[in-house]
């Protein structure tokens, strides 16, 4: 795919086709990591690096009768107010 860098406000931007993003398994709104390696711009999906988690699904695993409790962290080490 060949495209052009375009002016976008005070920045420059690229547009990616839907097909290209699908192939990279990246969706609109996903976080990506962008870096330069040996003169090439690399765009990497953060979800592919750390794994894919769905907060709703994770919360649904918490037992209905679970009660959170206070945890004692010890004495303050600085100017914290407990």
Image (tube, rainbow, N blue to C red):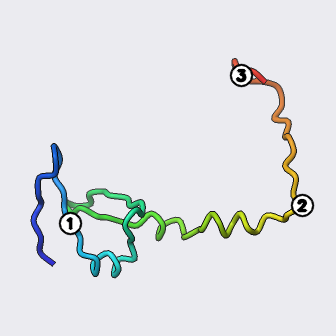
Identify the mark nearer the N-term, 2 or 3: 2
**Front label number (1 vs 3):** 1
Q: In the picture shown, does residue 23 fall above or below 69?
A: below
Residue 71 lies in quadrant? top right
Q: In the picture shown, does residue 69 fall above or below 31?
A: above
Task: Report how many numbered discs are placed on residues in the image.
Answer: 3
Residue 59 lies in quadrant? bottom right
> To which residue does mark 1 refer?
15
> 65 or 69: which is nearer to us?
65
Distance in Å between CA atoms under marks 2 and 3: 32 Å
Secondary structure of the residue carrying tag 2 is loop
- The 10 Å Cα crowd at callout 1, few under 14, some 14 to 19, many 20 or more, is few
Question: Residue at horizontal 85%, vertical 63%?
Answer: 64
**Front label number (2 vs 3):** 2
> To which residue does mark 3 refer?
80
- The 10 Å Cα crowd at callout 3, few under 14, some 14 to 19, many 20 or more, is few
> To which residue does mark 2 refer?
65
Q: Position of residue 62 (x, y in %)?
A: 79, 64
């Amino acid at each position: 795919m060949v495209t052009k860098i375009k002016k976008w406000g005070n920045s420059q931007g690229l547009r990616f086709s839907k097909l290209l993003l699908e192939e990279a398994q990246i969706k609109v709104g996903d976080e990506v990591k962008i870096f330069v390696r040996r003169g090439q711009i690399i765009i990497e999906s953060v979800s592919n690096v750390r794994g894919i988690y769905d907060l709703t699904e994770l919360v649904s695993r918490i037992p209905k009768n679970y009660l959170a409790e206070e945890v004692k962290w010890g004495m303050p080490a600085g100017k914290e107010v407990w």
